[in-house]
Amino acid sequence: MAQHSLKESDLIAFDHAAAGHDGVLSDASGDLVIKPCTAAEVAFYEASTAHPDFAAYMPTYMGTLSLSSQSDPAAAAEALTSIVNPEIASVTATSEVVTEGTATTSKPGDPGPAHGKKLDTGLSIVLENVAAGFKKPNILDVKLGARLWDEGAKLEKRAGLDKVAAETTSKSLGFRIAGMKTWQGVAAAEKNSTDKGGYKNFDKMYGRMFTADNVQEAFEEFLFVESAGITESVGKTLVERLLTEIKALEKIVARQESRMVSASILYVYEGDGKALEEALDEERVLLAEKSHSKISGDGDDEEEDDDDEEDVKSKVDAVKLIDFAHASWTPGLGPDENVLQGIRSVIRILQGFLE
């Protein structure tokens, strides 16, 4: 296993969690996301090597962060309280604190450090930061599923989550907006009408106010930000790109045998209109060059694909599935219709923008 040293002083609060997950951390470079995890989440990521098409829609799994113990239990408990993600119920505070740890990358087939056992907060999962590389990332978290609890949930919790589903689009559409943030442009930032970074933040309560009849308005709010230079034309380009990715994701999920309770679609795009158009232009040039190269028969296709990835300096957007704290691979049980309902509803809503 390759190991990469990380210290507490290297970790900072992660400020691009659209759904408001408290306690998620990042490294100083901003390339990594570090969050407390369940054994199920680690196992799901490690087993994804057997599902390469699906894994392409997951954040890159860098490994796990093992935390060293600290002699002061009170300080440890306080520190751990600040990093525990409240939506991961099986993570509990212990007398360990983030002082120094190791990000360990498992080899394919390695069962991982948990070996299926319950994890405490001494272990966090280390993932790529999907929002890294964007100048002003706009971020959308779409929580999937009409049923939001797994088989291990107590009856009281099931009832509470069923109530949330019934009162939101989760039950009717199989998804709800869990949170989003959009950059509002330089002028908005100067007027102090947004947070200090010029962002407008939409928390989980925002998503809960929509119905099946008007939830398209949330996508419109997210995808068409005129004050930041995201014009109607560019916004429709984003819709087309996102629709293409979600359709591809639907086909892949339909071929998997898994259960992903409370997983989300994460969509990130460049929120600075000028930077977005530049990134789109750069992408078009690269695609044209690649097409010309194939027609002329010059170069090796695999090498060209690698070169394209290296040449791209600007990012347009990214689509990922995230939040696998209650996910598992379930051979013999067929596809996850609970998740597919939500994905298919998103497809229908996006198609509405293009009709």
Image: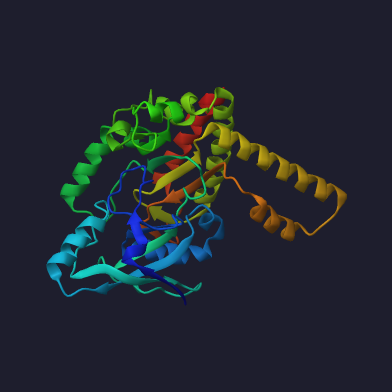
Left or right position of 65 against 227: left
Please, is residue 266 above or below residue 95 in the view?
above
Res 174 seen here:
no
Colour pattern:
rainbow
Picture residue at 47% right of the left edge, 37% below the top:
344
The answer to which image quadrant residue 235 occupies is top right
Q: Position of residue 289 (x, y in %)?
A: 77, 45
Q: Is residue 289 above or below residue 47?
A: above
Q: Position of residue 352 (x, y in %)?
A: 51, 25
Residue at 31% x, 68% y is: 123
Compare residues 261 and 60 and report the one nearer the observer. 60
Q: Residue at x 51, y 57 (%)?
A: 55
- Location of residue 187 with respect to 258 vertically, above or below: above
Q: Residue 127 is drawn in which quadrant?
A: bottom left
Q: Is residue 68 left or right of residue 41?
A: left
Residue 353 vertical position relative to residue 321 in the rendered view, above or below: above
- Residue 209: percent from left, percent from top: 29, 28
Q: Residue at x 57, y 36 (%)?
A: 276
Extreme residue in the front direction: 190
Residue 120, image x, y percentages: 25, 67
